[in-house]
């Protein structure tokens, strides 16, 4: 018989920028097998006096190859899926509440990359962070939200989907995934770039300048 017990756990996150000066806070959620410290580096092209970047790390860390060497993190698997979703939301809610109670920001953005896109989508749908901008990058829209997402949340945010034309994970369904986003989120801007499965600095800066 499966049972559960709730315990206190230590979560890790990294930041870039000056929260005392920045008027724009970003929560950026990494992809499968990445660590927040390295993922955060992809946002170093943004002005640290204008943008404060928060990179939370998925709660599940593991060795990428075998039983030693490089380590990556994951947001969830199919096992105990609903528990992990709840834990992710609690982590992100508490972290965002702590930071926004200490500092004031005019703009709030959620960005989810690859596997982090599903967690970003579900968290945005809860609307506790009240993001004004929502960016999904090289990820699949979570199927459990495709028919049930709170349309008002997405209508009230600036929405982007970004995909590299050479993304190795979407070569077989490039147009299909773009059309899926268009059908699920009516007011979404689709951006593509000539690159692979990565955060491309030029496109990132272009979005930041638009927001």
Image: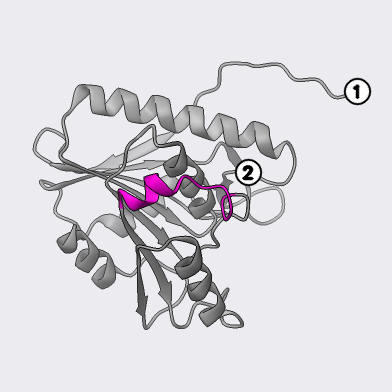
Crowdedness of circle 2 by 10 Å Cα count: few (<14), some, many (20+)? many
- Residue at 57 percent of width and 44 percent of height: 75
Which element is circle 2 on?
loop
- Residue at 56 percent of width and 78 percent of height: 176
* Image quadrant occupied by the N terminus: top right
Quadrant position of residue 2: top right
Residue 139 place in picture, x, y as percent: 51, 63
How is this picture coloured?
one colour
Which element is circle 1 on?
loop
Q: Which residues are magenta?
A: 145-157
Quadrant position of residue 170: bottom right
Residue 75 horizontal side relative to residue 46, left or right: right
Main secondary structure along the magenta-highlighted residues: loop
From the image, tell me which residue sits under label 1. 1
Residue 151 falls inside the magenta stretch: yes
Is the Cβ of the residue at disc 1 closer than 8 Å to that at disc 2? no
Please, which residue is most extreme toward the right here?
1
- Residue at 17 percent of width and 63 percent of height: 210
From the image, tell me which residue sits under label 2. 76
Q: Is residue 48 above or below residue 87?
A: below
Which of marks 2 and 1 precedes in the sequence?
Answer: 1
Residue 149 place in picture, x, y as percent: 51, 47
Q: Is residue 23 above or below residue 46?
A: above
Residue 137 place in picture, x, y as percent: 42, 63
Task: Tell which of 136 and 199 is nearer to you.
Answer: 136
């Amino acid at each position: 018989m499966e049972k559960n017990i709730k315990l206190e756990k230590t979560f890790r996150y990294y930041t870039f920028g000056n929260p005392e000066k920045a008027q724009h806070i970003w929560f950026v959620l990494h992809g499968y097998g990445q660590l927040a410290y390295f993922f955060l580096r992809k946002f170093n092209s943004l002005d640290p006096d204008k943008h404060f970047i928060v990179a939370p790390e998925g709660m599940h860390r593991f060795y990428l190859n075998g039983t030693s060497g490089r380590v990556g993190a994951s947001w969830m698997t199919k096992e105990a899926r609903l528990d992990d979703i709840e834990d992710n939301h609690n982590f992100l809610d508490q972290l965002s509440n702590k930071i926004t109670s200490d500092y004031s920001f005019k703009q709030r953005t959620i960005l989810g990359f690859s596997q982090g896109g599903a967690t970003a989508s579900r968290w945005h749908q809860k609307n506790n962070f009240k993001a004004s901008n929502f960016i999904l990058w090289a990820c699949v829209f979570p199927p459990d939200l495709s028919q049930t997402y709170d349309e008002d949340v997405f209508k009230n945010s600036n929405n982007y989907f970004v995909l590299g034309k050479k993304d190795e994970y979407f070569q077989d369904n490039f147009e299909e995934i773009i059309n899926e986003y268009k059908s699920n989120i009516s007011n979404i801007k689709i951006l593509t770039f000539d690159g692979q499965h990565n955060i491309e600095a030029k496109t990132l800066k272009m979005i930041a300048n638009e927001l």
